[in-house]
Image (tube, grey):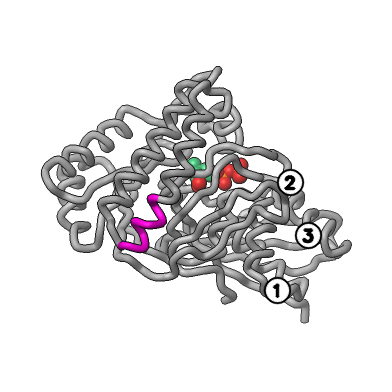
Amino acid sequence: MTKQVTARAHTNIALIKYWGKENVALNIPTTSSLSMTLDQFYTTTTVEFTDKATDELILNSVSTDSTRISKFLDCFREKHGDFPKVLVTSENHVPTAAGLASSASSFSALTGAMFGLLDLPQDTQEMSRMARKGSGSASRSIFGNFAVWNKGNDDESSFAESFYDDDIHLTMIVAEISSAQKKMSSTKGMQLAQTAPTYPEWVRKSADQLEQMKAAIVAKDIEKIGLIAQDNALGMHEQNRRSLEPFDYFTTQTIEVVEFAKQCYREGLLAFVTIDAGPNVKIITDKATEQKLLQKFRSNFPDLTFEVAHAGECLRYV
Ligand code: DP6
């Protein structure tokens, strides 16, 4: 029987963002970043060798363009010697409507599966390095709970590692906001953001915020975590608006949700936001507050869908 290996990895949401590359080909970032892996959203990927002429991708039962994953598999071929073409069968349990990046869980799961198929040592540092080449944020999805991707300055030194492997009762409520706009990819978006005159300042500030964030996680201080994450994310989006070709992922509803979260915080509830390369808002709170906050958001935004997520587990074989 043909050898098949299946791995599962979860998405992660950065509390300190990766938004810029020092080396585009290798995905070496301009900043170190820190994320929480989520329990709710994940990708399950099976790999096996095939005698077909090209690598193949079947995503959610549909044959899909395999150019990006084939380029990624070539990184394995370069490093570990040539091998036959690969059939990749992937199930994405990341609601596309939620606009959550699935590249993190996808490339992390594919990395794990390929390590199994090629019988490579289960070295999470090396897995993270490889996943990074597929998509930067995937370097962090190898790990559960909280991971830090140390930016490094070359292929060898740029990888993520577990920072705090425990659930600190942080909740993320994902507010799904749809957008009519054509989506700007993260890769392109960050390239533009780097042209903002204020970008170097955001990078400098991010290094300080990372240290403050680490301390806040260890102290399980959700308020501090939320305040720092919110400032870091809003700063990231400000670079997009100040770039040489200004653009914005926010829609009117994004702004309304952000403002409502700020109002809830003024009223004494733990409520903060973080936003990635799309219009959706992830509301940061704690487990004790989540139901109350969810109710407030649901009654204020009856048209929106909300999903509740907590800390999730690391990459594993299934
Ligand atoms: C806003 O990892 O999708 O989610 O490396 O070009 O594939 P590429 O980018 P990607 O960017 C993620 C950006 C972000 C912030 C973050 O996850 O840190």
Question: The disc labelled 3 sits on which kind of residue?
Answer: Phe
Residue 116 numbered tag = 1
State the residue position of label 2: 67
Q: In the image, residue 93 lies at what x, y percent? A: 48, 59
- Residue 93: in magenta span: no
Report the predominant secondary structure element of the magenta stretch: helix
Q: Considering only order in the chain, which callout, 2 or 3, is on the residue closer to the N terminus?
A: 2
Give the mark nearer the N terminus: 1 vs 3.
3
Q: Position of residue 36 (x, y in %)?
A: 43, 58
| Sequence-wise first label, 2 or 1 | 2
Give how far apart the Cα atoms at labels 2 and 1 are: 22 Å
Vertical relation: 92 (above or below) 205: below
Horizontal side, residue 3 vs residue 10: left or right? right
Q: Nearer the viewer, residue 241 or 149?
A: 149
Stretch of the chain drawn in magenta = 212-219
Picture disc at residue 76: 3
- Residue ID at (29%, 65%): 169
